Image: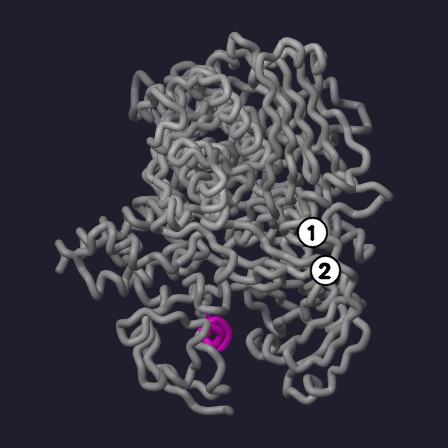
Amino acid sequence: MNETISFTLNGKSVSLTTDSQRTLLWVLRTDLGLTGTKYGCGKAMCGACTVIVNDRVARSCTLPIRSIKGKNVLTIEGLAKNGKLHPIQEAFVKHDALQCGFCTPGMILNAYSLLLKNPEPTREEIIEGMEYNLCRCGAHIRIIRAIETAAQEMKGAG
Amino acid sequence: MNEDKLQVAEHGHDEDIYPLSRREFLQSLGSGIVIFFAVGQVPTARGQSRGKKERPDFNAYLRIGEDGRVTCFTGKVELGQGPITSLAQTLADELDVPLESVDMVMGDTDLCPFDAGTWGSMTTPYFGPVLRAAGAEARAILIGLAAVRLKVPKDRLAVKDGVVFDKTNKSQKVTYAQLTEGKKIQKRLEQEPQIKTVGQYNLIGKPVNRLDARKKVTGEAKYTGDIRIAGMVCAKILRPPYHGAKVKSLDTSIVDKIEGAQVVRDGELIAVLHKYPDIAEKALGSLQVEYDIPKARFDDKTVFDYFVDNAGNSKVTAQGGNIESGQKLAKYMVEETYLNGYVSHAPMEPHAALAHFEDNKLTVWASTQTPFGLRRDLTRELGMSEENVRVITPFVGGGFGGKISNGQAMQAVKLAKIAKKPVQLVWTREDEFFYDTFRPAAVVKIKSGIADSGKIVSWNYDIYGMGSRGSQLFYDVPNHRTTVCRELKNGENMHTVATGPWRAPDNNTNSFARESHIDVMAARAKIDPLEFRLKNITDERFRRVLKAGADKFGWTPANKTPSGRGYGMACGFDVNVPVVLFAEVKVDERTGSIEVKRVVCAQDLGLVINPEGATIQVEGCITMGLGYALTEEVHFQGGDVIDMNFDSYELPRFSWVPKIETVLIEADESPSRGGGEPAIICMGGVLTNAVYDATGARLFQIPMTPERVRKAIASRA
């Protein structure tokens, strides 16, 4: 059923009228033109579609748009501020923590949520926190290293 | 030669050497210095090719523009393995320009000259050297121009960061940008120019971060599914329940009532189009369809016996000496059968394409490893000329061999032609598993003999279901024969599902079989696995790799076999790269689960362009290889593919990844080789050997699922 849905997207108010059962992933990618959030499996199993909703990690491919009414959504496009990369993005570049790059936005946002909850994670906690994001190219070791570096950087900045 | 003469000569040169279409192409390039080159052709001396009708064409070129920026146009594509960076690095080094001033234009059939495809670790060894030569040629031309401009002899000039200067008076200088301004120099690389040698490199051999990283961490990087053009609609295709199923009846009445939805059919291809892909997908569920389903011949368990029992003609692919006389020399004969199932490529980006007909021209954006192959297929299918078909390859989200065949692009084009509007098709994950060209299931039977001395004296190797890549022996066996059977009797198709190359095709299975068997023989002869290999390999390059890997791992002979330490090793040879892996595992005998603690890889890649990139490829190979060794296997019943998503088809996860150490043998004097494949081929062998060493249980089939491990433990001798 068509409904008008309003929410905050990367710090800006957004309002659109669409079938409220549609998922956030496809509304982002088509209606709103933000293609950094990727479709990987459609069943919340790979993490390519990861976004942040009210500071918590969410799999946008199974999240109905009506459930984000009035909420704060952060996508990969909203992470860098005024052209300055977020420390997690910086660390991914520095450590070559990506190859094909398709899982990267989801990896970065999952790490973002991980560090919000736990700013000083151990290596084991990083592995546990990233376990359900899939990467086929095998960048795992470097992703762990990048998150360790980002945690250090963010601690210094905070 | 003065500046003007050079310009006229070079400009005049191209007019008569290139065919008409090329001449138009060249004129469109505008000013600057352009160097053309062909990969895989011996540069012919100028003059020799003149007057001949069949002139070798170029298939890559670089341009130095008036702004001093360097652009390399290549038909190669960026799948994640990093050529966008390593090729730019190669070129920047030869030209002596900063890496940041190089732009790569890749995989666009209108802008880039022909290339066969990005696969088989060919980019670095074959494309790289010619690109270097072209860079060196361009540099020589610029030095020539600078000598005239600065009135300084060429040998007194040097270049740094795109600035040519007089070595004796550094204030006497001119930039590449100033030198190319207003010029139009087009030159074809015909004689090999002087390229840099070891010791002269500024960038080659140094670790460099990826040039595409920033775009990929910000979400700016565009993949095919991210392209938006005016008037386009999204397609979702109706996937049959079974390979070989035929549509018996189709009722579209429910979908016809959905606003904005359109059902399109071309034979067995049935799709729903809609502005929104999610609505198109939902609508598919409302199509009423009945199929005729063919009878199943085998499933994932019976496939191996089926191949052997119904084997058709086989071919001998290698042989030497005499197997029977070899067997007579043997003290022990060892005979075993090794099995390996179908695996999926499962790139994170599902296949995608966007097809747009405009006037008489077709443009297709596609996630493909073969943009030119796709263009050829499209021109044949549609009866269009090459000039009217353009394939553009945005970033590709992983290929591994799975994006060589372009089924999704052909589907999108057919739909766009019927619908008369641009159509974007992104396969669902389920489509991806169903239509994937799987790595084929295969059986390898090995019967071998060992002499009292510990030398392998006979080797009979029979393959069923796949090809021979990786079966070539690097062990010195005097009497050997390899046969390959890829057909069933009575002309029956071997595979029910589609199959194709998968990262280092055939070699993963061949290396698993061979290296398992080598360890079985070593155990039988009561010789340490490393010592046994060294006894039977004389190639010095290979021995160096073996010893370097063993040193790094800290391999020591055990006092008993199996030792209980969980140590394993395996060798392999792929795309002219000798590679060895050592691993340590821990096995939970109760559950059958395997923890891989550590993997050491040693390989000889020749001159390494980007050590960071090469190390990343090793890590990628080892991590990806954990999948086919431990969990990845496509379950199916006839044409019904059972694994359709990541719940039952398990890819390697963060917690599985071992400590990985890489040794790149220093071999700067030997040619560069590709590193995207070799390290993955040993993963099956090294882990089965390590599991044997841990438990005494030998697995003859991979992946080593917990169930198979428990079974092997229960039945161990």
The disc label shown at residue B498, or none? 1
Q: Residue at x 65, y 77 (%)?
A: B284
Circle 1 crowding by C-alpha within 10 Å: few under 14, some 14–19, many from 20: some
Magenta stretch, residue numbers: A25-33
Query: In the figure, B608 relative to B595: above or below?
Result: above
Amino acid residing under circle 2: His
Q: Quadrant of residue B232?
A: bottom right
Depth check: give the residue in front, B620 or B563. Answer: B563
- Spot the residue most to the right: B490
Marks 2 and 1 close (CB-CB < 8 Å)? yes
- The answer to whether B26 is drawn above or below residue B265 in the figure is above
Q: Position of residue B537 (x, y in %)?
A: 51, 14
Quadrant for residue A107, please give it. bottom left
The residue located at (80%, 24%) in the rendering is B52
Is residue A36 covered in magenta? no
Q: Position of residue B189 (x, y in %)?
A: 61, 26
Observer-nearest residue: B565 or B609? Answer: B565
**Magenta region includes residue A32:** yes
Q: Is residue B34 visible?
A: no
Residue B558 x %, y %: 35, 22
Could you tell me which quadrant the N terminus of chain B lies in? Answer: top right
Q: Residue at x 52, y 34 (%)?
A: B681
Amino acid type, residue under disc 1 in the picture: Ala
Which chain is mark 2 on? B
- CA separation in Å, label 2 and label 1: 9 Å
Task: Identify the secondary structure beneath mark 2.
Answer: loop
First reached walking from the N terminus: tag 2 or tag 1? 2
Chain identifier of the residue bearing label 1 in the image: B
Which residue is tagged 2? B243
